[in-house]
Amino acid sequence: MDLAIRAAILLTLLVIVASLGSGLFYLMKDRGDSRRTLNALIVRIVLSVALFLLILLGFFTGVITPNQSPLA
């Protein structure tokens, strides 16, 4: 479970970066004539929400632990 959550978080991050790159490519190529840039944005938003939920899942299951405060 530990490795699965960490791998899913890493994979989601990589797909978000790929979606960002495809959105930039479509923005430059289409010059706003198609909806491909919007679709890339929608995919990126959905993936970002999924990443947030994965991080919460990892936190609540104990896979991800916060760093200790430097004041403690």
Image: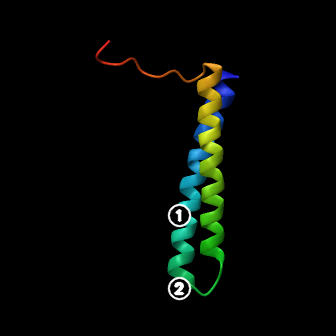
Q: Considering the image in quadrants, where does the C terminus appear?
A: top left
| Residue that carries the numbered disc 2 in the rendered image | 31
**Which residue type does callout 2 highlight?**
Arg
Q: What is the C-alpha distance between the residues marked 2 and 1?
A: 15 Å
Query: Judging from the image, what secondary structure is the residue with disc 1 in?
Result: helix
Q: Which residue is at 58% across, 39% downward? A: 10
> Image height check: is 38 above or below 50?
below
> Image height check: is 50 above or below 70?
below
> Image height check: is 60 above or below 28?
above
Label 1 neighbour load within 10 Å: few <14, some 14-19, many 20+: few
Name the mark nearer the viewer: 2 or 1. Answer: 2
**Which residue type does callout 1 highlight?**
Gly
Q: Is residue 21 left or right of residue 67?
A: right
Query: Judging from the image, what secondary structure is the residue with disc 2 in?
Result: loop
Residue 44, by quadrant, is bottom right
Q: Which residue is at 39% across, 17% downward? A: 68
The furthest residue to the top: 72
Q: Considering the image in quadrants, where does the N terminus appear?
A: top right
Q: Position of residue 62 (x, y in %)?
A: 60, 19
Q: Which residue is at 64% across, 83% downward? A: 34
| Residue that carries the numbered disc 1 in the rendered image | 21
